[in-house]
Amino acid sequence: MTLSTQFYTLLAMICMGGWLGASLDTYQRFLNRSRRKYFFVFINDILFWIVQGLLFFYTLLLVNEGELRFYVFIAILCGFAAYQSLIKSFYVKALEHIIQAFIRLYEFLLRTGDFLIVRPIKMLYQLIIVILLGILNVLLVFGRILLKTCWILIKICFAPIKWIGIIIWRLLPSALTKNVEKIFWKCAGFLKKVENIKPILIKWWKKIRKQ
């Protein structure tokens, strides 16, 4: 390994140490351990360190074809320590500002979408409902008027037939009319008996079904 390669390796590993510190802070900020279950935190920690290991190995592969030397660990430790002492406070504040900016942007987009899309759709929906209810009420009013008009016309048309029937009924012999009245009252009495028997039949049917 040439001296320039070693220098590039050392410089790359110092940067990767700083990257590790920033990644840890970012990971901790988004993970929110106190509100997560232990199993979820455990799985995420394993995945985080696997990804970091792959990134470190890929960086070494690009710089010195993957050769691992002792000073690589020293360089990583130096980069991590430099981040903790010099950059961490600024990075954490900047990260928090960026997160808050994205949250505000997200809330702004939600409010804008609600104002420009959701509310107009709700208003249009309410307007359509009001129009349909208005049309239905108008149709009901016209329907009632039409039914009343038809009923009046039917009465007017059948009035002559009614009076003719009354006149014919009065002209018939009294014996015939009395017989017709007797038959009518017998039919009415029979129907009344059937109505009285109906509850009894229903009770019997229910008892049969229970058995």
Image (tube, rainbow, N blue to C red):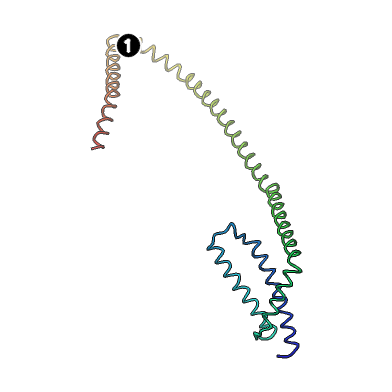
| 190 vs 19, nearest the viewer | 19
Image spot of residue 106 (x, y percent) = 69, 55
Which amino acid type corresponds to the residue marked 1 in the rendered image?
A: Leu
Residue 50 screen position, x and y as percent: 59, 73
Among the 4 quarters of the image, the one containing residue 12: bottom right
Task: From the viewer's perspective, tell me whether residue 158 is left or right of residue 28.
Answer: left
Q: Position of residue 61 (x, y in %)?
A: 66, 83
**Which residue in the protein does label 1 denote?**
172
164, 40: nearer the viewer? 40
Instruction: For label 1, count other residues whose C-alpha is less than 10 Å away and answer few (under 14), some (14-19) or many (20+).
Output: few
Give the side of residue 165 with respect to residue 16, left or right. Answer: left
Describe residue 160's horizontal placement relative to residue 183 as left or right.
right
The residue sitting at 57% across, 34% down in the picture is 136
- Residue depicted at x 58% and y 66%: 44
Measured as percent of width and height from the top left, residue 209 is found at 26, 37
Task: Name the residue furthest bottom.
Answer: 2
The residue tagged with tag 1: helix, strand or loop?
loop
Dividing the picture into quadrants, the one containing residue 86 is: bottom right
